[in-house]
Image: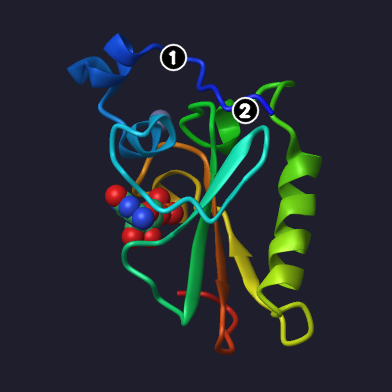
Amino acid sequence: MVPFIHMNAQLLNSKAHDCVFCKIVSGIIKSDVIKETDGFIVIKDINAVSPLHLLIISKTHYDSIINTDEVFNGNELLQLIKVISQEFGIDSEGFRIVINTGPDGGQTVMHFHAHLMAGRSFSWPPG
Ligand code: 5GP
Ligand code: ZN
């Protein structure tokens, strides 16, 4: 386990890095962590749009998928999605993964995260 964000507390508290997900990862903002791996934490979205709406948040701050580097473990993310789907029993009904990226993608929190939504059926194309 590497439960450490690549950033110190002073920087986390500074106005220069006012990132809500860094504060959640570091514990400055208390949150119920459902699951944790070396690189990610899983929490419930505060504004759920489906019966199950989880956020898979990278422990390291990347503004978005565009800024990820060779340390970012995409396979770990995919395996985590698979394990969550099995543990929550949504692997047979299915679910949707969304990684909003940038302004056109509708990203509102500039720290890499994937949405995992389940418990209802989703339409296509998205709005
Ligand atoms: P985005 O629009 O960037 O793809 O998604 C950001 C998500 O983070 C939104 O669905 C929003 O509801 C969620 N969110 C924002 N702030 C918080 C927070 O403090 N706690 C939790 N659990 N979710 C948050
Ligand atoms: Zn951050």
What colouring method underlies this structural image? rainbow
Query: Which numbered marker is on residue 7?
Result: 1
Ligand 2 within 8 A of label 1's CB?
Answer: yes
Ligand 2 within 8 A of label 2's CB?
Answer: no
Marks 2 and 1 sit apart, C-alpha to C-alpha, by: 16 Å
Q: Secondary structure at mark 1?
A: loop
Horizontal and vertical percent position of residue 2: 65, 24
Horizontal and vertical percent position of residue 115: 53, 60
Q: Is 35 on the left or on the right of 52, as rendered?
A: right
Taking the view exactly as shown, the residue that stands out farthest to the left is 15
Q: Amino acid at mark 1?
A: Met
Q: Dividing the picture into quarters, in which one does residue 9 lie?
A: top left
**Can you say which quadrant of the picture contains the C terminus?**
bottom left
Query: Which numbered marker is on residue 68?
Result: 2
Q: Dividing the picture into quarters, in which one does residue 37 lie?
A: top right
Q: What residue do we see at 28% from left, 10% from top?
A: 10
Q: Nearer the viewer, residue 76 or 33?
A: 33
Q: Nearer the viewer, residue 27 or 57?
A: 27
Residue 52, above or below 25: below
Residue 77, above or below 4: below
Q: Amino acid at mark 2?
A: Thr
Residue 11, above or below 114: above
Q: Secondary structure at mark 2?
A: loop
